[in-house]
Image: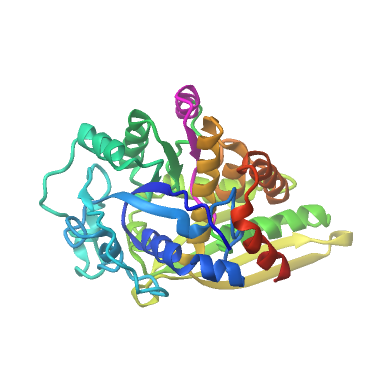
Amino acid sequence: MTMNRDTIRIAIAGIGNCASALIQGLHYYTPERCREGVVGLMHTEIGGYLPSDIKVVAAFDVDVRKVGVDVHKAIFCKPNCTKVFHADIPQSGVIVRMGQVLDGISEHMMDYSDDRTVIRSDAAQLSKAEIVNELRRSGADMLLNYVPVGSEQAARFYAECALEAGIAFVNNMPAFIASDAAFAERFRQANLPIIGDDIKSQLGATIVHRVLTDLFAKRGVKLLRTYQLNTGGNTDFLNMKNQERLTSKKTSKTEAVQSVAKKRIEDENIHVGPSDYVPWQNDNKICFLRIEGHLFGDVPMELELRLSVEDSPNSAGVVIDMVRCCKLALENGIGGVLEGPSAYFCKHPIVQYTDDVAYTMTEAFIRAYGRKNPAATDAVLEATAAQ
C-alpha cells in the first residue's frame, strides 16, 4: 500500500483521559494494521487520511504533573486512569504548556487525594496572545477542546483562541459553542470549520438511549418515562460531583434523547445525567437505563439495560472522525458549523437529526469533500470491505 503521508496537525486543550485514549489510538492504528483490517473505527480512512496521519503539535494543561512534560508522556500521568492499550509511544517533542485555569478546576476537587484530582501547576499561565502565537507557530490545523465539564469560561476562551489563530475548532465538551448561533456565525464569517458540541461516544449511554427512544417512536410504542443513571471513577465523574457544573451537561444529554422521541417527554418523567462517583471504577463507566411505555391496547411494558464501557477509548474513535472531517472542510474552504458531522458525532449540535439521517448526511459530506483519486487508500478500502 502506497500512502500519501499528508499530516493533520492538531492542538489539544486538556490532556486528560480522553486525550490519552486518542493519542494511544493514533499510534495503535498503524497503516499496517489498517491494511490488514481493524476493528473499533467507524471509518478506517476518510478522504485519504488514516488515524496515524494525525499528529499532536501543541498541547495545553494546568496540572503540575503534565505541564513541562512531553505530551506523549503526560497522557500517562496521574490523575489519568484510562486503560493503557498502547504504551509504546515515542517522545513527540511537543511539550505541554501551561494554559489558562479560569473555571477549569472545581474547588471541591481539592478535598480528594492527589492521585484522583488535579494539582494546579504554579507555572505562569500563558496569556491569550501567547496561546494564539503557539497555535500559529505549531502550524496546527485545529484545536480540540477537552477542558473539564462545567468549564464554560475555559471552553469559550479556547474557542476564541482558535478564531484568533485562524484554525478550526472541535468541541468535545458540553459547553454550547457550535450550537450557539452567535459563535457559529463568527466561525462562518472567518471561514473556519467547527464541530460540536459534546461528543457522543462510539457505543455509549447517550447513543444507546437515543437509538432505543427512536425505536419506540418507529414501532408505535408510547414512551411514558425514562432514566439514564451513570457512575464512574475518573476525574470527569469526580468533577461532576459539583452539581453547579452540570447544567450544560444535563441539558446536552437530555436534549439528545428528547430530540428523537415521538412526543416530547414531560420534564418530570425524564432523568438523564451523571449520578455518582465511584473511585474504584476508574475510567469504567456503568450506565443503568430504564424506559417505560405502553404497547398495543395500552398494555404496559418496561425495558432495563446495563452498559459497561471504558469511557475514554469509547470516544476516541469518534474524535478521529471529527478531526478528519474538519480537515476535509479546511481543504475545501468550508467554514462554519459542519451540520451533518456535528449531528452525527455530538449530543448537542446546532440542529438535531435522528442518527440515521445524521449518518447519511455525514457520509454524503465525506463523499463530496474527500480528496480526489485517493489511490493511497485503495488497499485499506479493500481490507475494510472484506471484513
- Which residue: 23% across, 53% down? 96
User: Is residue 243 left or right of 353 when viewed as pictured?
Assistant: left
- Which residue: 57% across, 43% down? 342
- Which residue: 62% across, 43% down? 370
Tell me the colour scheme of the image: rainbow
Of residue 193 and residue 78, the one placed in the foreground of this image is 193
Q: How many marks?
A: 0
- Tell me residue 280's x, y (percent): 36, 77
- Regarding residue 116, the answer to whether it shows in the image is yes
- Tell me residue 245's x, y (percent): 36, 48
Residue 44, above or below 188: below
Residue 221, above or below 344: below
Is residue 197 inside the magenta stretch?
yes
Q: Residue furthest front?
A: 2
- Tell me residue 225's x, y (percent): 66, 57
Of residue 272 and residue 166, the one placed in the foreground of this image is 166
Residue 4, above or below 287: above
Of residue 171 and residue 151, the one placed in the foreground of this image is 171
Residue 69, picture quadrant: bottom left
User: Is residue 382 left or right of 39 when viewed as pictured?
Assistant: right
- Which residue: 47% across, 53% down? 5
User: Is residue 180 left or right of 159 when viewed as pictured?
Assistant: right
Quarter of the picture holding the C terminus: bottom right
- Tell me residue 257's x, y (percent): 62, 51
Residue 132, picture quadrant: top left
Of residue 257 and residue 244, the one placed in the foreground of this image is 257
> Which portion, as a residue range, is magenta?
182-200
Q: Residue furthest top?
A: 189
- Regarding residue 315, the answer to whether it shows in the image is no
Quarter of the picture holding the N terminus: bottom right
Is residue 17 inside the magenta stretch?
no
